[in-house]
Image: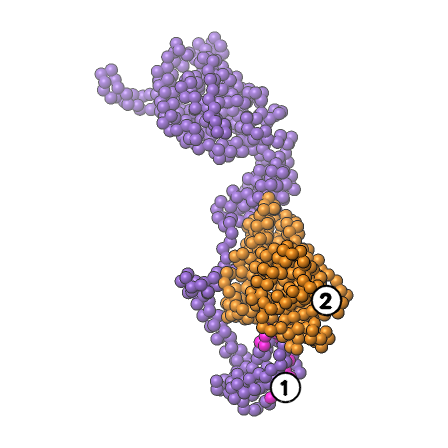
Chain colours: A orange, B purple
Amino acid sequence: MSEKTYLQAISDGLREEMRRDQRVFVIGEDVGVYGGAFKVTLGFQEEFGAWRVIDAPLSETAIVGGCTGAAIMGMRPVAEMQFADFISCAWDQLVTVAAKQRWRAGTPVPITVRLPSGGGFSGGPFHSQNPESSFAHIPGLKVICPATPEDAKGLLASAIQDPNPCLYFEHKHLYRRIKAEVPDERYETPFGKARVHQEGDDLTVITWGAMVYTAEEAAAQLDGDGVSVEILDLRTLIPWDKQAVLESARKTSKVLVLHEDTHTGGFGGEIAATIAEEAFEDLDAPVKRITAPDSPVPFSPPLEKAFIPQVDDVVAGLRDLAEY
Amino acid sequence: MSTETAVDVVMPQMGVSVSEGTITKWLKSEGDQVEADEPLLEISTDKVDTEVPSPATGTLTQIVVQEGETVEVGAKLAQIGGTGSAEPAEAAPAEEAPASATAQAAAESAAASGAEGETPAPEPVAEAPSAAPAPAGDGAADGKSFVSPVVARIASEHGVDPAQVQGTGRGGRVTKKDILGFIEQGAPAAAPEAPPTPPEREPAPTPPAPPPPAPAAEPAVPQPVGAAEGEQFEPMNAMRRGIAEHMRRSLDTAAHVTSAIEVDMSKVVAIRKKLKPEYQKAYGINVTYLAFVARATVETLRDYPWINGEIRGEQIVTRNYVNLGFAVELADGKGLIVPVLKHAEGLNLLGIARGVVDIAQRARDKKLSPDDVQGGTFTITNPGGYGTFHGTPVISQPQAAILGTYAVVKRPWVIEDDRGEDVIAIRPIMNLTLTYDHRLVDGALAGRFLRDLREKLQTWDESAY
């Protein structure tokens, strides 16, 4: 074990997969010479050469399309979108081709697309989004949202080895802010297994990504009220750990779903609906959602703060549920 | 920007994810004159190495962070203008002011745009997550009556009535914790789903309603919370719980409406005065006004089968008999039971008088059999014994109506004398109320029933009864 930042864990995990599996290669804008916009692939081109760490032209369509072709031919490409927001350019390759290939032709498409996502740094509307729910809706894609350095490494290994197209959302706000112990050896963190970030009896927060820490800070403020909060980190949205969610919902009977993505059509709606369908008789309060409002991410720092769910918002939501 | 006042040079935010930076080189020294936008120092972050331009024109009065040091984004690196180290205290508020002004302006602009409604971009911002309205259950006033799914399930699994539980949720709502705590403290089993029944009898008599779980032998006393000063607790017995449940269920089931009528009881009073000693002597029976009213009611019901009827599912039930229930107060004054006089249509005045005496006595002696309290088709309640002249009784389910009889009171009454003149006479007047389930019985029907009943009492034909 050694302490690593979230970003370092991603970088180390990716390097390890490239070292052990010759089929793995990296492609993206500025991933080679520059070492990536966030320096995840710093030093990769020196170690693996320009044919395995490919600087792509400014075309997400070409990057994902090229990866899809290479994957069909037996490679294990890892694409980097400089920002998750830019993946909309690659929608057609990803959704129409990669996601459906297995059903259409029976060939697996083992690609991993790394998506630096999330706001909090005044990145504005094009550099701050959390578009995970858009892809959770597409059958054939897997959606991964690690929150801890350990999961970042283990889930990346799983994504690269998975035979399906995997969207790996790495939250920018966690890159250098979050440091934790990461096992030195190689390991794979399984998809569809939620992580209990903290145990509690009175309320459940279901969340993922950077919001795990927002929930943790909020829950700490409720300690004083004698309200104990369970925080479930989903880790992956497709597949998602329905069983763990329902178990926790049955235990506490009061559930808050928290995400940084916008409200309408956000994945929180899917979770709330599933709880209503399958754990209705265990609910003691309506399932509550705290999300960003339905607007693009504002650039202005105070407005962005108002947009992204803050600790105080979650505290208020938890109190409301506790008092219900 | 040229300045006499102090301006801070801070570690800039060099990228979305960058949280800190390292000073690699100062390009100016303390005391140097610098121009706005002139390169001042070099920094290195995770992402980039870059020069930082001076934010103002003036003298570099103080360097706070030395070469090689790493500091957080926003940390003060140096100061331009002012008088040096003494200044920061003043400089800080100067920095804050515009920041909060900006925030306020932003908030105002957000609010203003929100009000316009049509503006696409800022409008949703006005509904920041914290401002999201609380979901259902906000209606504090009726919070107690809302039973959440989990509370309903636990209540049904343990046979507990949530209404018995002290709620601590919003508006007094019973929460999952409340009901679990209540059960842990030894909640009583559910009250029998029946009209008030004799507590000692086994099995508990039940009307056609679905059979309830049998009441626990002697249920533990629930004490969800301690008594406040001046309060005392007393356990609710099975009968009281049964009454409570039945009354509530009746009001939740039937559309209760009450109509009243005044009856001149002169003729009944006269006949009773004559019969009373005769019946007493011959049969040992005290014939009461109630017996007269009951007898007249049974006769009247023959013409009003719906008032003697019942709604059962989608069907209306009518009968060719009358099983007449009488509400009887128990001896201790802490309960009520409704024994039934079966086939009252076959009883004359004496038979009814005798039947009423018999069931009332057995009710007070707790000697009723389950059969005695089942199968009623119509009920009479007589709260007039204490002088009350009006009331709105609750229908005994699943019946369609209940008759209330009240005190016979001497009142000035306008009548016609032999010559057809209006005169005021003293007459014994009794009010009768019919409380009926408007789902089945309409007001006009109830009115005609009361009119006919009054007619029978006012023109009592001794030979016919």
- Of B70 and B285, the residue lying toward us: B70
Amino acid on which the number 1 mark rests in the picture: Lys
Q: Label 1 lies in what chain?
A: B
Residue B303's place in the image compared with A59, above or below, is above
Q: How far apart are marks 2 and 1 (CA)?
A: 43 Å
Q: Residue B25 — which label? A: 1
The image quadrant that residue B257 belongs to is top left
Q: Give the total of numbered labels.
A: 2
| Residue B255, image x, y percentages | 44, 33
- Of B330 and B185, the residue lying toward us: B185
Residue A88's place in the image compared with B272, above or below, is below
> Where does label 2 land, which residue?
A23
Instruction: Name the outermost residue toward the right.
Output: A185
A61 sits left or right of B106 in the view: right
The image quadrant that residue A184 belongs to is bottom right
Amino acid on which the number 2 mark rests in the picture: Arg
Determine whether the residue tagged by mark 2 lies in a helix, strand or loop.
loop
Residue at position x 36%, y 20% in the image: B452
A181 sits left or right of B83 in the view: right
Note whether residue A108 is visible.
Answer: yes
Residue range (magenta): B13-27
- Of A242 and A101, the residue lying toward us: A101
